Amino acid sequence: MRVMPKILGTLLLVAGFMPAAETTPSEKKVFYYTSDQVKTAFGKDPKSSNDTNGVLGELLDSKMIPKFKSASSYKVTVRRKEQKQDPEFHTTKTHIFYVLEGNATLVTGGRMSGKAAADEGGTIKFPGQTMEGGETWKLDKGSIIVVPAGVVHWFKDIPSKPWIAFNVELF
């Protein structure tokens, strides 16, 4: 029985050093997308020449919201692919893909032998090329992959069309 007061006293001492819980409501905005909005984001962008969903797939871009200016930047998109894509890497962007539909073969970390083309957003593309070496990943429904900034990645094959994934881009 004497042990109980010691345990209780220790817990009260530890609790005294814990930060107080926030007692005022937060003014942070919650972002919600209806299932219809998300389904629209899955669609093909009529302006796309390579059967992707382009801007149509974008749900949220933290850089466009003033309250997020000082926070880490991120973008939430839905990606749709129906054909392979040229290899690329991003100097500042990490991809987190959660596959919703279809499957794709992604190759990461290989070597490029040709010339690169950079855009102003920090994406380095290798038009018309394939990768040598690297690691091959089968991205099927329910799988998640994180591709860190600086890692070359190539959607080598999309055998089950369309391939659709929920994507978070961290900058």
Image: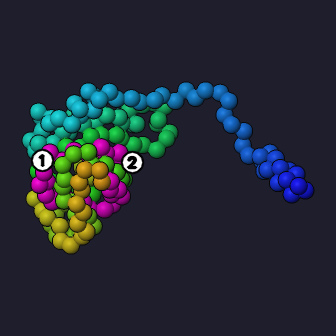
Query: Which residues are drawn in magenta?
Result: 144-171
Q: Residue at x 14, y 45 (%)?
A: 162
Q: Earlier in the sequence, mark 2 or mark 1?
A: 1
Quick check: can you spot residue 55?
Answer: no
Amino acid, disc 1: Lys
Which mark lies nearer to you, 2 or 1?
1
Tell me the crowding category of disc 2: few under 14, some 14 to 19, or many 20 or more residues within 10 angstroms, Cα based: some
Circle 1 crowding by C-alpha within 10 Å: few under 14, some 14–19, many from 20: some
What element does badge 1 sit on? Answer: strand
Q: Quadrant of residue 34?
A: top left
Asked if residue 156 is among those painted magenta in the image, a careful observer would answer yes
Q: Main secondary structure of the magenta part?
A: strand
Tag on residue 170? Answer: 2
As drawn, the label of residue 161 is: 1
Looking at the picture, which amino acid does disc 2 mark?
A: Leu
Q: Where residue 156 sits: x, y (%)?
A: 15, 60
At 41% from the left edge and 30% from the top edge, which residue is drawn? 31
